[in-house]
Amino acid sequence: MSETGIRSAPRTFWPIWLAVAIATAMVAGTLALWVHYGTAVFYEMILAGIAACF
């Protein structure tokens, strides 16, 4: 008799969960800044940051 059991997938999902956690934190931070500073000020901050890169 041969054993033909179902193999479980290796536990290598932690990088995916880490990426999801980082993305969630970034979105939450963005929303918090948006609520705190308002749309106009937040937009100006983003433009100033992009301009500083160039």
Image (cartoon, helix red, strand yellow):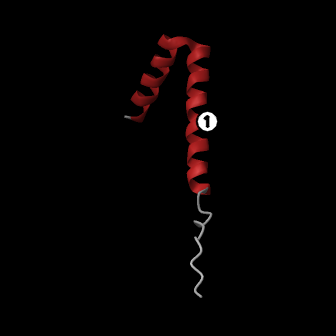
Query: Percent from the top left, x then y, of residue 50?
Result: 41, 30
Of all residues shown, which one is farthest toward the front? 1
Residue 16 x, y percent position in the rendering: 56, 52
> Left or right: 11 with respect to 48?
right
**Where 37 sits versus 27, above or below?**
above
- Height in image: 20 above or below 15? above
Q: Tell me the SS state at disc 1.
A: helix
Of 45 and 2, nearer the camera is: 2
Q: Give the quadrant of the N terminus.
A: bottom right
User: What is the quadrant of residue 8 in the picture?
Assistant: bottom right
Viewer-proximal residue among 9 and 23 = 9
Task: Tell me the quadrant of the picture where the C terminus can be found.
Answer: top left
Q: Residue at x 41, y 35 (%)?
A: 53
Residue 45 location in percent, x, y? 49, 21
Which residue is at 61% across, 22% downward?
32
Q: Quadrant of residue 13?
A: bottom right
- Under mark 1, the amino acid is Ala
> Residue at left 55%, top 18%?
34
Residue 46 percent coordinates (x, y): 46, 24
User: Which residue sits at x=60%, y=49%?
Assistant: 17
Which residue is identified by label 1? 25
47 relative to 23 in the view: left or right: left
